[in-house]
């Protein structure tokens, strides 16, 4: 794994974070592959294609007045044309009703492809641990 490749991939993920904080859907379009498949915490089971991914973020922007996103412990494995990474992420901010929320920590996995010389997020998955006996999500864990 070269330092340049790692820097390029981290830069793409930073573009997602910057786009979220700015609530800028067009800025969010650039780091993703057009055929991105996203397994998010919100239904349906999968969001297929960039328009579905952006619609998912647009729903967040409809609820939040201000958005922040924190990513911790991003670890990358990089090949010639594919890479993957995992981290912990937390979306937080102030909702349109004025209520501030610290959000919850989730597990994030990224799959990337080099497309025309640029790393793009081709897959992401966000998950919440759950208690198997109750079937309830466990949302108070911290990295």
Image: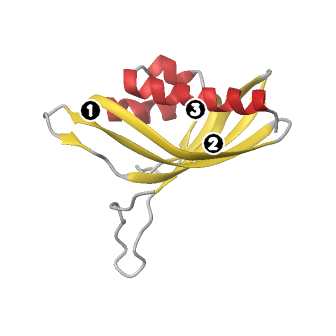
Q: Residue at x 34, y 35 (%)?
A: 60
Quickly name the residue at label 2: 123
Q: Are the residues tagged 3 and 1 within 8 Å (C-beta)?
A: no
61 above or below 75?
above
Where residue 93 sits, quadrant-wise, is: top left
Where residue 124 sits, quadrant-wise, is: top right
Q: Residue at x 34, y 60 (%)?
A: 139
Q: Residue at x 36, y 33 (%)?
A: 68
Where residue 29 sits, quadrant-wise, is: top right
Does any portion of residue 27 appear in the rendered image? Answer: yes
Q: Residues within 10 Å of mark 1 (few under 14, many from 20)?
A: many
Q: Is 55 situated left or right of 102 in this image?
A: right
Task: Report, in whole angstroms, how far the alpha carbon at label 2 lies from the one at label 3.
Answer: 12 Å
User: Sequence order check: which comes first, mark 2 or mark 3?
Assistant: 3
Where residue 111 appears, as percent x and y from the top left, is 67, 43
Quickly name the residue at label 3: 13
Secondary structure under the numbered disc 1 in the rendered image: strand
Where residue 25 appears, as percent x and y from the top left, is 44, 21
Q: Residues within 10 Å of mark 3 (few under 14, many from 20)?
A: many
Q: Nearer the viewer, residue 102 or 58?
A: 102
User: Sequence order check: which comes first, mark 3 or mark 1?
Assistant: 3
Does any portion of residue 32 appear in the rendered image? Answer: no
- Nearer mark to the viewer, of 3 and 1: 3
Q: Residues within 10 Å of mark 2 (few under 14, many from 20)?
A: many
Where residue 115 appears, as percent x and y from the top left, is 77, 26
Secondary structure under the numbered disc 2 in the rendered image: strand
Task: Report, in whole angstroms, how far the alpha carbon at label 2 lies from the one at label 1.
Answer: 24 Å
- Nearer mark to the viewer, of 2 and 3: 3
Quickly name the residue at label 1: 64
């Amino acid at each position: 794994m070269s330092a340049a490749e790692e820097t390029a991939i981290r830069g793409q993920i930073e573009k997602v974070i910057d786009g979220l904080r700015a609530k800028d859907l067009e800025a969010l379009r650039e780091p993703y592959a057009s055929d991105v498949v996203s397994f998010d915490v919100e239904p349906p089971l999968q969001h297929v294609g960039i328009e579905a991914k952006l619609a998912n973020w647009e729903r967040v922007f409809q609820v939040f007045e201000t958005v922040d996103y924190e990513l911790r412990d991003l670890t990358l494995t990089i090949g010639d044309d594919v890479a993957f990474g995992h981290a912990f992420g937390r979306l937080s901010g102030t909702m349109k009703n004025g209520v501030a929320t610290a959000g919850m920590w989730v597990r994030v996995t990224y799959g990337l492809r080099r497309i025309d010389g640029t790393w793009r997020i081709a897959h992401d998955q966000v998950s919440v641990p759950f208690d198997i006996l109750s079937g309830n999500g466990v949302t108070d864990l911290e990295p």
